Image (tube, rainbow, N blue to C red):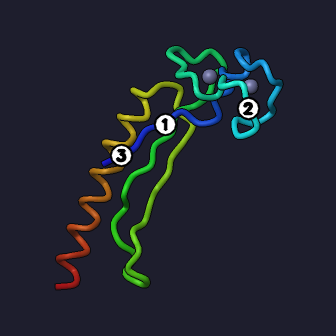
Amino acid sequence: MAYFRRRGCTCWKSKCKCDAEKKSECTCGASEIKIKKCTCGAKWSFSLDAGVNPKNGKRKQKTVSGFNTRDEAEKAATILEYELLSKTFIADIQHP
Ligand SMILES: [Zn+2]
Ligand SMILES: [Zn+2]
């Protein structure tokens, strides 16, 4: 399962009344407003589960960013998920 988000969107700043530099510094509530249409050109990224690291047993996360639209990110995620699945499958055969 891939998780999509838009990174570094600064659209909230145009609504901010307290002149905050970062979202965490905003006290007027502008950073909580859901932006329907991003106009600042922030790129989309996705994270997906890349299986378990055999060394420490922890789950690995793979993040890829730099997509102009969510659609582009979704397509790339589908391809990557497929590649990861086929790699796991091959690894299983090689090490029974
Ligand atoms: Zn934006
Ligand atoms: Zn503010």
Percent x, y of residue 77:
37, 43
Horizontal side of 94 relative to 84 (left or right) equals left
Percent x, y of residue 32:
59, 28
> In what element is the residue under mark 2?
loop
> In what element is the residue under mark 3?
strand
Residue matched to label 3: 2
- How far apart are the alpha carbons under marks 3 and 2? 29 Å
Q: Amino acid at mark 2?
A: Cys
Relative to residue 11, is residue 8 depicted above or below? below
Query: Which corner quadrant of the image does residue 16 belong to?
Result: top right
Relative to residue 51, is residue 45 depicted above or below? above
Residue matched to label 2: 26
Residue matched to label 1: 5
Looking at the rendered image, the disc whose residue lies closer to the viewer, 1 or 2, is 2
- How far apart are the alpha carbons under marks 1 and 3? 10 Å
Mark 1 or 2 closer to N-term? Answer: 1
